[in-house]
Amino acid sequence: MMLALGMFVFSLHTLAHQQLQRQTEWRHATNARIGAHPGSQFLGRGEDEITLPGTLLPELAGSLVSLDEIRGMANTGKSWALVEGTGRVYGLYVITSISETRTLFFQDGTARRIEFSLSLKRVDEGRVDLMGATVSATSNILRALV
């Protein structure tokens, strides 16, 4: 197991990402001042986004159904606990977009290669301690899988 988003487990059998790209922002407001540099005030955390690009090769690794499962999760609009295979908890994330590019087709139109990118956005305001039972249950299930 590489990563889990809610009950969806990223692995070679389902959907394996090749990278985990994370961008975190912090907000600072500035105000112009006469005869001095602009004043700056820290406003708190900004957006925290994760992008998971990867390649799905249905003949060798992964399942076409996995992208449909992720789309189904996104359709609910719910947030999901994101937990790394090491046990590291990232927080609660919503799925904001999925893109896929299908290439190398069989005669019936089935793709041999599907490049995908999954975008996630953190929604728990950095309060991992408030996730309680969701994280505990997910962590226990993930430990059982490893």
Image (cartoon, rainbow, N blue to C red):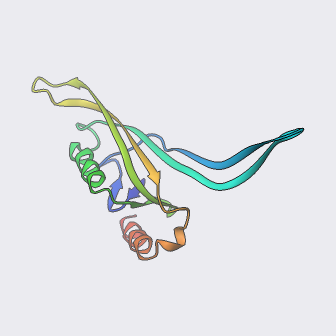
Residue 10, image x, y percentages? 36, 52
Q: In the image, is residue 22 above or below residue 99? A: below
Residue at 34%, 47% (x, y): give it.
Answer: 12
Specify whether residue 50 is in view: yes
Residue 39, image x, y percentages? 80, 46
Residue 52, image x, y percentages? 43, 43
Residue at 37%, 50% (x, y): give it.
Answer: 95
Residue 32 image-quadrant placement? top right
Residue 110 image-quadrant placement? top left
Question: From the image, which quarter does the C terminus lie in?
Answer: bottom left
Left or right of 110, for residue 143: right
Foreground residue among 23 and 11: 23
Q: Given the current orientation, which residue lies at the most extreme right position?
A: 35
Residue at 32%, 56% (x, y): give it.
Answer: 77
Q: In the image, is residue 55 above or below residue 85? A: above
Residue 59, image x, y percentages? 23, 36
Specify whether residue 1 is in view: no
Q: Given the current orientation, which residue lies at the most extreme front position?
A: 34
Left or right of 138, for residue 84: right
Q: Given the current orientation, which residue lies at the most extreme left position?
A: 108
Foreground residue among 73 and 15: 73
Q: In the image, is residue 25 above or below residue 128? A: above
Question: From the image, which quarter does the N terminus lie in?
Answer: bottom left
Q: How many marks?
A: 0
Left or right of 88, for residue 26: right
Foreground residue among 24 and 40: 40
